[in-house]
Amino acid sequence: MFPIVLLSVFGIALLFLGFLKSKAILLPATLLFLLITLAVNFLDWNKTYLYFNDMLRTNNLGMVFTAIILLSAFLVVALSGSLLENEESQPAEYYAIILFSLVGAIMMVSYENLIMLFVGVEILSVAMYVLTGSDKRNLRSNEAALKYFLMGAFTTGIMLFGMALLYGATGSFTLGGIGAYSAHSQGLSLLLYVGLLMLLIGLLFKVSAAPFHFWTPDVYDGAPTIFTAFMSTVVKTAGFAALFRLLSVSFVGVYGFWWTILAIIAAITLLVGNVTAVYQNSFKRMMAYSSISHAGYLLIGLAALGALTKQAIVFYSLAYSVATISAFGILLLVARQRSIQTITSEGVTSENFDSFNGLARQNPFLGFAMTVSMLSLAGIPLTAGFWGKFYMFSTAVERGQIWLLVIAVLMSAVGIYYYFRVIIAMYFRDGATEAIQVAPFYKYVLLAATLLTLGLGIAPGLLQGLF
Amino acid sequence: MLTLFLILYPAVAATLIFLIGGERIKQIALVAALVELALAGYAFFVFTPDATSQFGFDYPWISSLGIRLSAGIDGISVLLVLLTGLLVPFIVLSTFNRTYKQPATFYALMLFMQAALMGVFTARDGFLFYFFFEAALIPIYFLAAMWGGENRIPVTFKFFVYTIFGSLFMLLALVYLYFQTPATDVATHSSAIADFYKLKLTPEAQNWVFWAFFIAFAIKMPVFPFHTWQPDTYVEAPTPATMLLAGIMLKMGVYGLIRFILPIVPLGVETWGKTAIILAVIGIIYGAIIAIRQRDMKRLIAYSSFSHVGLMAAGVFSQTETGMQGALVQMLAHGINVVGLFFVADIIFSRTNTRQLDQLGGITQSTPKLTVYFLIILLGSVALPLTNGFIGEFLLLHGVFTYNHYLGLAAGFTIIFGAVYMLRMFQKSMFGPTSSRTESFADLTTSESWVFIPLIVLVFWIGIYPHTFLKVTEPAVANLMKYIGTTAVSMK
């Protein structure tokens, strides 16, 4: 609960800081706010509280997810220095919106009542719509924002409808109430199933699982890179935390009904994400499809809901978020300094793989950091991503869903193809000769992300105490 | 604890080499590799020949899942540890007359590779094994793709995707086995390989676990028809990387067969072992025939290696003690021979700028040392009695013959074919009139000689007194056979 209050206050404070002439204080202030929130988050460790008339419940799992979200936000903000250089941008507003959106994300990981889930989803989403369109002069950014908003608003409606149906079936909006109802295995109202399905559609849209993924590539591509990084990590983590909470508390009784649906969606998501990613020429669009495919891996854990799922989702979210942010951070540097943005047929810019040509030779550090994050996303040992996949696969093996795993394994092999395109470009192709400047602070952030990925890859037990 | 040093030391040395850099990096790398050889040699000679695992260490790793950092050396690992320790210094020494760009990275990657390989051969935990199995791939990928030939990018990429693809199936099998181990209230499941041995899997499960493992190892070795990545990769990779690939890395596959498939899924082996042997025998003959047709020395050696490894796979699946012993000794022997042969190819290439047999010839006129060393290594590879190849091939063929006479006969062609392509290679390159490229061929330098001399000592040592090596593996192999026997019988 503390993080929600603090972030709201800090967000307003940031807006006021925006009145200052110098923008220099904004970034350190935001980082400080995030650090304070991160520290305060753990005050309630090992305690369970209910807040706001039982609307929110804090527990260890929620705090761990909150920590991952805050950490992701911290990394993204730390890499967002370019916002300050741009004359037209309004960094104070952006940072404030980011802080406010985190309030929504944290509600999504600790809700106890469906209404709170809805409020959380909306707070997060509205912030995302705004950030997507924040590059006002860029037509593609505008288009992306509009697309995201229209589709998002539509799914919000479906989700709300689903909640209403669930209320009709169970007479309750609370997770516990719905759980108690669905625990009776017989004589359940049809409304429950329909409501659950509609609610799932809403959340699966947010985490960009197929077939609700169509917005993802356009929005990721159109949004300014730094917000793409935010969107692909924070939204996804919050979405999966919300899904996990919903399914593990309220709908365990009807597991038999929804696991096949989720498993099939997972399979489709894996296929769509990985296969389409192979055909992309733009790095950002590739990352968009890669993000879809990671939703597929995470869904495996949900479809095989069991003792290991919690651990698997936490670990996977963390591994995925850190690697993704690091990749986008490097893209940001390279794209800005090499001005390699090419004009596509629509007259707008996109960052393609060629921009990374020869990067490892000019800047071995960036090459190494990017390699680690790509290896992690591909799930190669020595990196955190490997253990993420490992835990995911373990959940499904425990449930005996071998067919799903065979698909996942095949798709992992496909994944190597497009992640390695970046590595090949960096190490084995000749490219621009001018060196890439990296500010020291930027470098430390990337270094921290890389070390975290490697550290968790070698000693995954480090996270042990957290779940 | 010795095992821990064997794994950690090269990794630390690699990091230091990477950081130090500078002119004398070759010498530093050589010294580093020699220290590892001393450690491995010590482990080999101090090893007590029985069925236990020695010099081990055991720490918790992911305690919530019962996964442990556990490794040690037993009779099956010991030869491979020796091989890994032995070959790397000679591979480093073989590069002394060559300059590679970014030498610090180059040697650091080689030592990282060595660390991972040591881990593979000593791991006692299934997931630790997998971890190292994959970790070995990353350095070799960069070695091959950064310093390789013209076509290196697509070729090494294919190699990488192929092997990862296979390994992922192994991961599935390992996770499955993990959940089959009994979990109590006190302890979780276990991923110790020893616990996998105790499992009594249903025949259906054994069948798919067999294939999941087999695909992973068959791609690594490679066994027909999973070999398509191999010749191109061997040719495109820089020679030291090819030596690592052929000399040590392909042994990971054979080792995996012995360590995992035979004891864990004996019924799977009973059902599918024959298919596996037939594939291996096809590989033996097919590889040999293609080798005969090759003009490029490196490609020829690559196919010969494909052919030889097929025999090792067949020997393992014969499920006989001689076959298994043969596979172990042959892994050592083949590693020594193939590194020698690739080095010869590299020397010839560095002086003439070609590896095409029809552009060579007459080298022997000016190179007494090279001729003698090349011939000895070559005869070892052809399996002449008194050389290392003979012991291994004899035991392997004996094993396959015991399993099935016809398959044994077919596999026996390897000796005839081997003699054909090897002697043809020797004849075309070394004898006959000199060509414009070989007119002023200089004999070996001191550092080059020092690569060959120890290898040749080993060729004869293994060939004349194999007991040194067979005696250490014997109890472990006998123990393994017992496992195969009891599990198979109790299931019936």
Image (cartoon, rainbow, N blue to C red):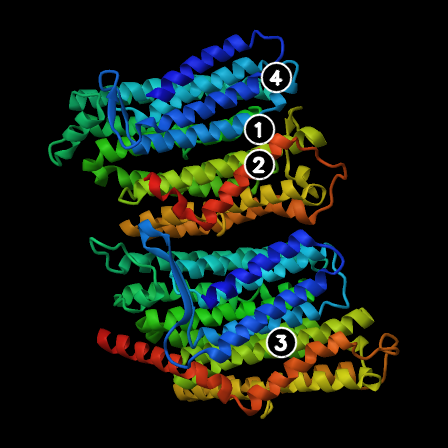
Residues under numbered marks 3 and 1 in contact, where contact means CB atoms less than 8 Å apart: no
Distance from label 3 to label 1 (Cα)?
50 Å
User: Which is nearer the N-term, disc 1 or disc 2?
Assistant: 1
Residue type, mark 3 in image: Val
Q: Name which residue lies at 84% across and 78% down.
A: B442
Residue occupied by mark 3 = B338
Q: Which x, y percent locates residue A35?
A: 46, 25
Q: Would residue A342 be seen by someone viewing this image from the given angle? A: no
Pair 3/4: label in front = 4
Residues under numbered marks 1 and 2 in contact, where contact means CB atoms less than 8 Å apart: yes
Residue occupied by mark 1 = A79
Residue type, mark 4 in image: Ala
* Residues behind callouts 3 and 4 on a single chain: no
Picture quadrant of residue A153? top left
Question: Position of A325 compared to B371: left or right?
Answer: left
Residue type, mark 2 in image: Leu
Question: Position of A23 compared to A234: left or right?
Answer: right
Pair 2/4: label in front = 4
User: Which is nearer the N-term, disc 2 or disc 4?
Assistant: 4
* Residues behind callouts 3 and 1 on a single chain: no
Distance from label 1 to label 4 (Cα)?
14 Å
Pair 3/1: label in front = 1
Query: Mark 3 falls on what kind of element?
Result: helix
Residue occupied by mark 4 = A24
